Image (cartoon, helix red, strand yellow):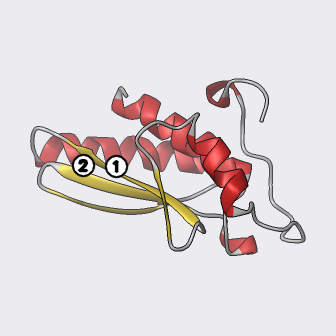
């Protein structure tokens, strides 16, 4: 866990690496304020609040562009004044450091 997560980029996951343990994931959470481990430590999730539907939609569009640029894509649900983003590395059915890189970058997009 070295370096600033915002300056890092996702590296393709080959699928032959083990997911982070729950204890390892808890250590990474310290660098991603507002995020929580869910699904027995297999993904990180955060709900963001916004003033209205348009702000939530614009945030989702920003996250989408970031995901495409990094080659790592979240699950997103959103509605009037809110958006929930979940990161998980599907190839390994759990968490990878890429998920925390993307969580930190998602925070940055939201201004938090």
Question: Secondary structure under badge 1?
Answer: helix
- For label 1, count other residues whose C-alpha is less than 10 Å away and answer few (under 14), some (14-19) or many (20+): many
Q: Residue at x 75, y 24 (%)?
A: 3
Hey, which quadrant is residue 93 in on the image? bottom right
Query: In the rendering, at what x and y percent does residue 47 appear?
Result: 31, 52
Left or right of residue 43, residue 94 in this image: right
Which part of the image, by quadrant, shows the C terminus?
top left
With respect to residue 5, does 21 lie above or below?
below
Residue 71 visible in the current orientation:
no
Relative depth, front residue between 62 and 96: 96
Tell me if residue 62 can be seen: yes
Callout 2–callout 1 Cβ contact below 8 Å: yes
Query: The N terminus lies in which quarter of the figure?
Result: top right
Q: CA distance from mark 2 to mark 1?
A: 5 Å
Residue 55 lies left or right of residue 96; in this view the side is left
| Residue closest to the eye, 2 or 49 | 2
Q: Residue at x 72, y 31 (%)?
A: 8
The residue under label 1 is 60
Residue positioned 53% across, 44% down in the render: 103
Query: Relative to 66, is 78 above or below?
Result: below
Asked whether, in this view, residue 11 is left or right of residue 77, the answer is right
Percent x, y for residue 36? 46, 53
Q: In the structure shown, which secondary structural element does the residue marked by tag 2 occupy?
A: helix
Residue 85 position, x and y percent, is 40, 56
User: Is residue 71 left or right of 74 when viewed as pictured?
Assistant: right
Residue 110, by quadrant, is top left
Residue at position x 54%, y 36% in the image: 104
Residue 35, position as x, y percentages in the image: 45, 47
Q: Which residue is mark 2?
A: 57
Q: Nearer the viewer, residue 48 or 73?
A: 48
């Amino acid at each position: 866990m070295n370096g600033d997560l915002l300056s890092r980029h996702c590296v393709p996951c080959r699928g032959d690496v083990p997911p982070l343990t729950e204890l390892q994931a808890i250590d990474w959470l310290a660098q991603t304020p507002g995020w929580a481990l869910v699904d027995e430590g297999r993904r990180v999730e955060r709900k963001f609040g916004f003033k209205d539907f348009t702000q939530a939609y614009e945030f989702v569009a920003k996250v989408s562009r970031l995901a495409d640029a990094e080659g790592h894509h979240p699950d997103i649900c959103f509605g009037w004044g809110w958006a929930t983003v979940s990161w998980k590395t599907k190839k390994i059915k759990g968490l990878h450091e890429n998920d925390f890189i993307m969580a930190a970058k998602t925070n940055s997009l939201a201004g938090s």
